[in-house]
Amino acid sequence: MLTVIAKIGTAVLLLSIFYWAYYVDKNKKDERSEKIIGKSSKYSFSFTYILLGFFSIFYLNGYIDPKNVFNFLVIIIALMSLVNSLFIFILNKKMG
């Protein structure tokens, strides 16, 4: 089950990266887009630090099997990228 979620997370990661690259390419010389990317990156990285904190707590207490660490890290990175792309989309609609 976890491997399936990790594979879905990989697809979400790729789609999020493509959306981010599309947005950056579309708005190269716009100061507003730089603010949007900056804000969305702040939110996504803070979200990632919170997730990594929970992951560390669960791993150190033995709730996460060492065999599944890679899958959990893929899911966390995919969630970070998804949050970044969602905030880019939301802030672009809000500020645009």
Image (spheres, rainbow, N blue to C red):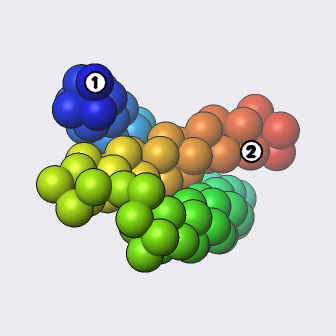
Query: Residue at 74% across / 45% down in the picture?
Result: 91
**Element under label 1?**
loop
Q: Nearer the viewer, residue 32 or 13?
A: 13
- Expressed as whole percent of the image width and height from the top left, the position of residue 43 reads 68, 62
**Mark 1: amino acid:** Met
> Is residue 10 shown above or below 27?
above
Left or right: where 13 falls relative to 80: left
Left or right: where 95 falls relative to 67: right
- Residue 1 is tagged as 1
> Is residue 29 shown above or below 12?
below
Residue 17's image quarter? top left
Residue 30 in sight from this viewpoint: no
Q: CA distance from mark 2 to mark 1?
A: 34 Å
Query: Residue at 48% across / 53% down in the picture?
Result: 80
Mark 2–mark 1 CB contact (< 8 Å): no
The crowd level at tag 1 (other Cα within 10 Å; few <14, some 14-19, many 20+) is few
Residue at the far right in the pictured view? 94
Query: Residue at 23% across / 51% down in the picture?
Result: 68
- Counting residues from the start of the chain, the first of labels 2 and 1 encountered is 1
Residue at the far left in the pictured view? 67
Q: Nearer the viewer, residue 38 or 8?
A: 8
> Is residue 24 shown above or below 23?
below
**Element under label 2?**
helix
**Mark 2: amino acid:** Leu
Q: Which residue is mark 2?
A: 91
Residue at the far front in the pictured view? 62
The quadrant of the image that shows the C terminus is top right
